[in-house]
Image: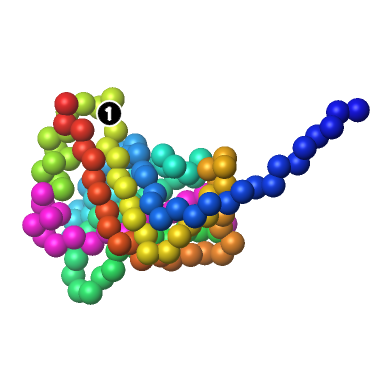
Amino acid sequence: MKSIQIEKNKWEKINKIVLRVDNVDLIYKQDLTINFVCGFENISRGRCVLLVKEKNKKQIDNLFIHNDKALMEVNIFLDEKKLDNLLHYISLKRNSSKKIKVTISTTDSLMINQKGDLYVDSETKIKINEINWNIPLL
């Protein structure tokens, strides 16, 4: 009989989520929305929809984690000039093999185990402190 060691999941706190952009769509109705479909670099499963919109009022950048599906939704609100700049830099991207990376810093910690699984107990909405874009041009 084999001896099987049961390893307890060791959870660690993270305050940064790294996204890999797989697809970008522009949605233009009354206002412009940039829709990024992303995978995770530091979380093992799931997908993320990142929506960038023009800031209208006192909207706060946030992320929402579903507890019933492997989906995270991120809402980023930029002033018109920053939104135009982001569109400009995305349009300069010519190398399709290198993906855009987006690093999101959050106010509250998320929990992941050694396998990179995200701990989700209930639906969670978290404020975003900072977002960094890495857009490879060549």
Q: Quadrant of residue 134?
A: top left
Q: Is residue 67 left or right of residue 40?
A: right
- The residue located at (30%, 40%) in the rendering is 101
Which quadrant of the rendered structure holds the C terminus?
top left
Three-letter amino acid code at the position of disc 1: Lys
Q: Is residue 132 magenta?
A: no
Question: Quick one: which residue is furthest to the bottom in this view?
Answer: 58
Crowding at mark 1 (Cα within 10 Å: few <14, some 14-19, many 20+): some
**Residue lying farthest left?**
81
- Of 98 and 16, the residue lying toward us: 16
Give percent across and percent down for residue 105.
34, 55
Q: Which residue is mark 1?
A: 98
Vertical order, 40 against 28 (above or below)? above
User: Which of the pair 127/32 is nearer the observer?
Assistant: 127
Q: Nearer the viewer, residue 34 or 130?
A: 130
Q: Is residue 70 magenta?
A: yes
Please identify the quarter of the rendering in which residue 15 is found. bottom left
Name the residue rendered at 12%, 35% in the picture: 92
Depth check: give the residue in front, 100 or 4: 4
Number of numbered discs present?
Answer: 1
Residue in the picture at 77% in, 37% down: 5
The region drawn magenta spans: 68-85
15 in relation to 46, above or below: below
Residue extending farthest right: 1
Q: Position of residue 4 (x, y in %)?
A: 80, 34
Q: Quadrant of residue 95?
A: top left
x%, y% of residue 72? 44, 53
Which image quadrant: the N terminus?
Answer: top right
Point 37% across, 45% down: residue: 18
